[in-house]
């Protein structure tokens, strides 16, 4: 009886561990590709639990990225991007939206271009999602 219990426990914990291993973190990457203006890109992302602070990216700097596991409550990261000599252009959008089930290994890539903010999910081609608002 006791042995069977230990055996079941082992099977269970192995199963849980291998599932955790298989669930790769989700990632959001943000890139400055402001080809014409070569403006600084300011980025600020927040979720319910985390404030990731201000980040400043120069033209074609390596992407700013962050990764995370979905939480049981729906995970959502909202970001604001600013560009322009006086950061007078901005846009505010949801950079990652979790669902009712926990997602693994999702890759949301955002790229700031002169005409707007482009998006690619899981390395698909970039699509224009938002244009810049001026203050
Ligand atoms: C940068 O943006 C230009 C369009 O403005 C686009 O043609 C080019 O593919 C982009 N480069 C990268 C590395 O995404
Ligand atoms: C994410 O950031 C790390 C460190 O800043 C960098 O080494 C890595 O290449 C980045 N990955 C992507 C996909 O941008
Ligand atoms: C971002 O957008 C949301 C709703 O779309 C709004 O409530 C919030 O004030 C905006 N934040 C900024 C800094 O623009």
Image: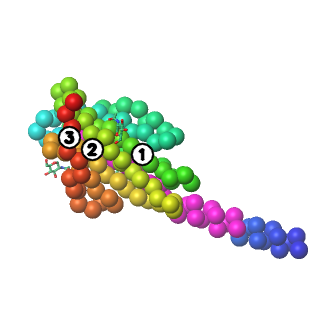
Picture layout, residue 37 above or below residue 109: above
The x and y percentages for residue 125 are: 23, 60
Instruction: Indicate yes or no: mark 1 CB to ligand 3 under 8 Å.
Output: no
Q: Is residue 61 visible?
A: no
- Residue placed under numbered mark 2 in the picture: 31
Q: Which badge, 2 or 3, comes first in the chain's sequence?
A: 2
Picture layout, residue 95 above or below residue 4: above
Structural crowding at the residue carrying mark 1, measured as other residues with C-alpha within 10 Å and reported as few (<14), some (14–19) or many (≥20): some
For the residues marked 2 and 3, what is the alpha-carbon distance in whole angstroms? 15 Å
Q: Is residue 12 visible?
A: yes
Residue located 51% across and 62% down the image: 101
Structural crowding at the residue carrying mark 3, measured as other residues with C-alpha within 10 Å and reported as few (<14), some (14–19) or many (≥20): some
Secondary structure beneath dot 1 equals strand
Q: Which badge, 2 or 1, comes first in the chain's sequence?
A: 2
- Residue placed under numbered mark 1 in the picture: 77
Magenta stretch: includes residue 92: no
Q: Where is residue 60, by image quadrant?
A: top left
For the residues marked 3 and 1, what is the alpha-carbon distance in whole angstroms? 19 Å
Picture layout, residue 71 above or below residue 47: below
Between circles 2 and 1, the one closer to the viewer is: 1
Please state the extent of the stretch shown in magenta in the rendering. Answer: 12-32
Magenta stretch: includes residue 20: yes
Asked whether disc 2 touches disc 1, contact meaning CB atoms under 8 Å apart, the reply is no
Instruction: Indicate yes or no: mark 2 CB to ligand 1 under 8 Å.
Output: yes
Residue located 64% across and 68% down the image: 15
The x and y percentages for residue 29 are: 34, 47
- Residue placed under numbered mark 3 in the picture: 132
The x and y percentages for residue 111 are: 25, 47
Between circles 2 and 3, the one closer to the viewer is: 3
């Amino acid at each position: 009886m006791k042995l069977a219990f230990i055996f079941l426990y082992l099977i269970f914990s192995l199963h849980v561990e291998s599932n955790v291993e298989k669930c790769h973190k989700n990632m959001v990457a943000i890139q400055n590709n402001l080809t014409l203006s070569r403006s600084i890109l300011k980025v600020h992302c927040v979720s319910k639990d985390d404030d990731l602070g201000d980040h400043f990216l120069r033209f074609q700097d390596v992407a700013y990225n962050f990764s995370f596991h979905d939480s049981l409550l729906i995970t959502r990261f909202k970001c604001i991007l600013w560009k322009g000599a006086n950061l007078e252009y901005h846009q505010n959008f949801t950079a990652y939206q979790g669902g009712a089930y926990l997602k693994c290994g999702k890759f949301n890539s955002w790229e700031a271009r002169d005409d707007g903010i482009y998006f690619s999910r899981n390395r698909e081609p970039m699509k224009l999602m938002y244009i810049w608002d001026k203050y």
